[in-house]
Image (cartoon, rainbow, N blue to C red):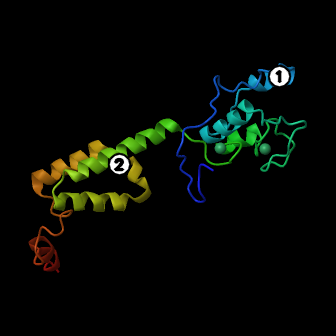
């Protein structure tokens, strides 16, 4: 035994390694396999596409023999194996036809991620007080946080530099803030 119980880390290199990559049509040149291999997987998210392509590659893919019932419109309109929704419903709802999660837009995700990283690194370089102000602002934005642009934050910081932002830097002024006591004394 190369691995003891609970030890899942392989100690030795893999004993047998395929000289060539697995080919599903090496011994099977049937029409069916050819058709499956030429399938274009659409209407599903990246993850589901990978899963289905994996199934095709390793001959686990089982095409539908008859149209399947869509979980949304309850019509027998599904023509693709492993799909839960028919193409029409998936398109209308803008979700993946297999996992039914919102259709992903990888580009948008990437932008959000790099933006978050940029915001984080920008915050790191700020003095404590400004950082707190920006964080407070970001928290207020809540779910809109993703939409906060770096340019906008940079502008905020510039403004802070310019006028030391009376309102945002609420710990900047002492309790007897002349502005608010002025307002109170009016009436
Ligand atoms: Zn449907
Ligand atoms: Zn999916």
Q: Disc 1 versus disc 2: distance between alpha carbons?
A: 54 Å
How many C-alpha atoms fall within 10 Å of the one at disc 2: few (<14), some, or many (≥20)? some
The image quarter in which residue 91 lies: top right
Is there a contact, CB below 8 Å, between mark 1 and mark 2? no
Q: Which residue: 79% across, 50% down?
A: 71
How many C-alpha atoms fall within 10 Å of the one at disc 1: few (<14), some, or many (≥20)? few
Task: Give x and y (percent) for residue 115.
Answer: 36, 43
Q: Which residue: 35% across, 48% down?
A: 148
The reply to whether residue 149 is in sight is no
Please tell me whether residue 110 is drawn above or below residue 166 in the rendered image: above
The reply to whether residue 87 is in sight is yes
Pick the residue in front: 56 or 129: 56
Task: Indicate the quadrant containing the C terminus: top left, top right, bottom left or bottom right.
Answer: bottom left
The image quarter in which residue 87 lies: top right
Ligand 1 found in image quarter: top right
- Mark before the other along the chain sequence, 1 or 2: 1
Please tell me whether residue 113 is drawn above or below residue 54 in the rendered image: below
Task: Give x and y (percent) for residue 29.
Answer: 83, 19
Q: Secondary structure at mark 2?
A: loop
Task: Give x and y (percent) for residue 12.
Answer: 54, 42
The label on residue 186 is none
Q: Which residue: 64% across, 33% down?
A: 16
Task: Give x and y (percent) for residue 46.
Answer: 60, 38
Which numbered disc, 1 or 2, marks the residue closer to the eye? 1
Q: Which residue: 59% across, 52% down?
A: 3
Q: Which residue in the structure is indicated by mark 2?
A: 148
Q: Secondary structure at mark 1?
A: loop
Q: Is mark 2 within 8 Å of ligand 2?
A: no
Pick the residue in front: 23 or 100: 23
The label on residue 28 is 1
The image quarter in which residue 68 lies: top right
């Amino acid at each position: 035994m190369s691995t003891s119980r609970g030890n899942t880390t392989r100690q030795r290199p893999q004993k047998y390694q395929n000289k060539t990559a697995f080919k599903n049509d090496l011994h099977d040149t049937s029409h069916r396999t050819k058709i499956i291999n030429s399938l274009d997987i659409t209407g599903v998210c990246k993850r589901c596409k990978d899963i289905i392509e994996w199934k095709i590659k390793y001959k686990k893919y089982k095409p539908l023999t008859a149209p399947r019932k869509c979980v949304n419109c309850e019509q027998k309109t599904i023509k693709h194996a492993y799909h839960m929704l028919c193409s029409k419903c998936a398109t209308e709802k803008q979700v993946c036809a297999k996992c039914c999660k919102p259709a992903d837009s990888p580009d948008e995700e990437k932008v959000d991620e790099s933006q978050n990283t940029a915001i984080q690194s920008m915050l790191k370089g700020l003095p404590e007080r400004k950082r707190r102000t920006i964080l407070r602002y970001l928290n207020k934005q809540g779910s809109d946080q993703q939409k906060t642009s770096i340019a906008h934050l940079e502008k905020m910081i510039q403004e802070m530099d310019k006028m030391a932002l009376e309102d945002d830097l609420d710990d900047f002024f002492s309790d007897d803030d002349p502005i608010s006591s002025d307002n109170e004394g009016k009436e």
